[in-house]
Amino acid sequence: MKLHEYQSKRIFAEYGIPIPRGDVAATPVEAREIAKELGGPVVIKSQVLVGGRGKAGGVKLAKTPDEAEQVAKKILGMDIKGLTVEKVLVDQAADIRDEIYLGVVIDRARQKPVIIASAEGGVEIEEVARVNPEAIIRLPVDIRMGLMDFQARDLAFGLGLKRDHVNQFVRIVKGLYQAFINTDASLAEINPLVVTGEDSLLAVDGKIVLDDNALYRHPDLAELRDKQEETPAEREARAAGLSYVKLDGEIGCMVNGAGLAMATMDIVKHYGGEPANFLDIGGGAKADKVAAALRIILSDPKVKAVLFNIFGGITRCDEVAKGILAALEEVNTNVPMVARLVGTNEEEGRQILAAASFPSASTLGEAAEKVVALAKGA
């Protein structure tokens, strides 16, 4: 779950990270009043959960409150990569002298958080890694010990910060790390952290991505979700407790288990098809959950065929079969389908489908080959 810039920066402020004075506006008039209260030049920044806002015209400078109102009028309602700008952040403009990238991520290979920093801030860190990888510093952190002061100081010196900035940088990087840990984030990022003309450090942009699996521990953060970020299908999947990601292919996939779902998508591609989605119904799925999953898959107009690949353990194959038929009673479709049911109550599940003249396969390879042929009209 992604947080907006203004939401991320407010969390940063709770951990002692200096951020610009500013507030969020939903109308041009509100933007004018915020700019008037701040005094001096302001930056009007679209609040949408995509990158490239500046290149799309969603970030602009305004020197006066009247200009802030006019700029906000142009930005509000803009379409940026398919998302409509409903709010803008009005921040006091900073006198930027230098820019630093600072972020915390999970390194799955090391199985620990890693702080990533670069003196080349203000651009995407992926671009820095591609063009000048030597400019990136990586600092693994022992989760039991936390980030130590000496590590933060070494990082500051590695970035070439002046001695006058080191203590402030130590507070910022430790605050960022603690925000990352306490919110169960998968990413906490300041880009850029700037050195201002007043010779101080300031986080002028921020980003936090939360781990969805930990949101049950943070109901206050879960309430910050921007529903515009999700498609209707993704919202329905979340409400039904399904793991769903829309892709660009033509073969809908319903599978139980994330690893099996990945293998299913791989074998679909192996036989010349393209998966239309990742959808994991999870363990113990009943007929109603299967029906909800099928409705979601069929809501995608690109889907030309559907593959069910169920390995019955906790999930019973007969329940899945009932769910498939129940969904087909609710959704009128002529999209061809193939099912491969193996495991708990597989014979019962196959008998239920056979009685309804529903195509099935005994192996995953056979099922994938059949569904790709059906998607191609064979």
Image: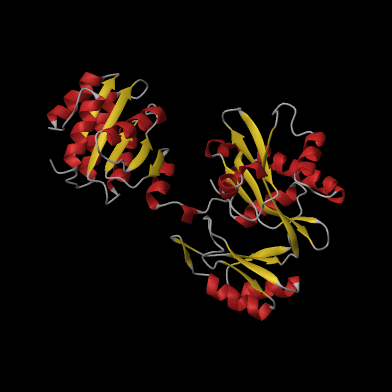
Residue sitting at 68 percent across and 74 percent down? Answer: 33
Residue 184 appears in the rendering: no
Residue 332 appears in the picture as rendered: yes
Q: How did the renderer colour the structure?
A: secondary structure
Q: Is residue 166 above or below residue 205?
A: above
Image-based side of 57 in relation to 99, left or right: left
Query: Is 207 on the left-hand or right-hand side of 18?
Result: left
The image shows residue 173, relative to residue 144, as above or below, that is below
Q: Is residue 237 left or right of residue 55?
A: left
Quadrant including the C terminus: top left
Q: Position of residue 256 (x, y in %)?
A: 36, 29
Of residues 255 and 56, the one drawn nearer to the viewer in this rendering: 56
Residue 35 in percent (x, y) is at 70, 73
Q: Quadrant of residue 287?
A: top left
Q: Picture quarter containing residue 114?
A: top right
In the image shown, does 139 or 321 lie closer to the viewer? 139
* Residue lying furthest right: 164
Please state which of residues 49 and 201 is positioned toward the viewer in this rendering: 201
Give the x, y percent position of residue 270: 28, 33
Q: Residue at x 18, y 27 (%)?
A: 352
- Relative horizontal placement of residue 100, taking residue 377 as reference (left or right): right
Q: How many marks?
A: 0
As displayed, is residue 73 above or below residue 147?
Answer: below
Residue 173 location (% of width, % of height): 74, 43
